[in-house]
Amino acid sequence: MLIDVIQETLIDCLKLLPFLFAAYLLIELIESRAEDKTVALIHKAGRWGPVAGAALGVIPQCGVSTAMSNLYAGGLISRGTLLAVFLSTSDEMLPILISSNAPAGFIVRVLAVKVAAGILTGIAVDTLERRFGHPRHMSLRELCEQENCHNEEEGVLLSALRHTGKIFAFLLAVSFVMNLLVEALGAERLGSFILNRPVAGELLAGIIGLIPNCAASVVLTSLYLEGGMTAGAMLSGLLVGSGVGLLVLFRMDRDWKDNLLTLGILYGSGVFFGILAGAMGIL
């Protein structure tokens, strides 16, 4: 069991490396060359951020949510855009549904609900924060000072590689612990908490979705295919699940109140749309 957990952890984390490096390289380039102009440009087009974020999140990888967490911590994207990515992130759900010969119509409806939930939640959050003036608490320059990102002597490339390695080690350690917990609990035991419990099923599935690991999407999708939960419960968990994106967010953003607000909105909206989809029979 331990060898399997180690192997799975290494594979999952290695998949994230290109996304991590791309995010940190972008941060280094912006911070060292044109932070103010770039941030102004992103903020100017920010109203469309949740739409683009929801579309990016559908890519079946944890890496997109990981990269976006870094960009949010540096003030480059809005909370609504980050939530849109988190809610639409599919992780391993899509490959599992396809390999299990799930109906194409069902897969399309699941993805459509996740994208729609991401866009609606993201736009609503951004609109409210613009109206009530919720400020971003950290700039990209402040993030880089906190993390010692940019080093004139080693250059942008080496600095990005160094920072990628530091966060990769952090993710490797935490993901290993999470995989051990999931393996110890077992999918059957998790399913017994959710089976035949309307509304409560969505609430509990959302909690499983909060597990900061791609394994959560595997457990949720597999349980649904085996009859261990309703489609609404599965959707709630998958909407809340954002892979290791939450881990990176809490690691990079030291404002825990802000992080908990993002977490609360993510959980509440994911459960809400899961219950709504289940009640309307969309899936």
Image (cartoon, helix red, strand yellow):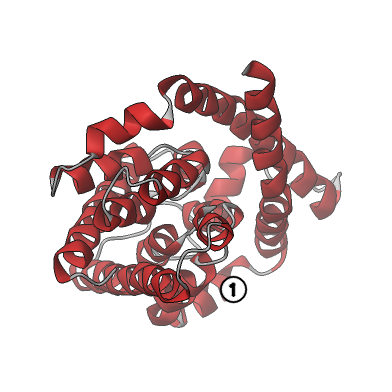
111 and 98: which is toward the camera: 98
Q: Is residue 124 left or right of residue 41?
A: left
Of residues 222 and 227, the one drawn nearer to the viewer in this rendering = 227
Question: In percent of the image, x 54 and y 54: which residue is there?
Answer: 96
| Residue depicted at 43% across the width and 50% down the height | 221
Relative horizontal placement of residue 90, taking residue 206 as reference (left or right): right
Q: Is residue 238 above or below residue 34?
A: above
Label 1 SS: helix
Q: 56 or 228: which is nearer to us? A: 228
For the C terminus, give its image quadrant: bottom left
Which residue in the structure is indicated by mark 1? 38
> Visible in this render: residue 163?
no
Please identify the quarter of the rendering in which residue 33 is found.
bottom right
Q: Is residue 182 above or below residue 119?
A: above
Residue at 73% x, 53% y is 18
The reply to whether residue 133 is visible in this rendering is yes
Q: Is residue 31 above or below residue 175?
A: below
- The x and y percentages for residue 148 are 66, 39
Q: Residue at x 72, y 62 (%)?
A: 29
Q: Nearer the viewer, residue 132 or 183?
A: 183
The crowd level at tag 1 (other Cα within 10 Å; few <14, some 14-19, many 20+) is some
The quarter of the rendered structure image containing the N terminus is top right
Q: Position of residue 127 (x, y in %)?
A: 25, 74
Where in the figure is residue 20, as x and y percent of width and height?
A: 67, 50
Q: Amino acid at mark 1?
A: Thr
Q: State which quadrant residue 231 falls in.
A: bottom left
Q: Is residue 148 left or right of residue 191?
A: right
Q: Position of residue 70 (x, y in %)?
A: 55, 52
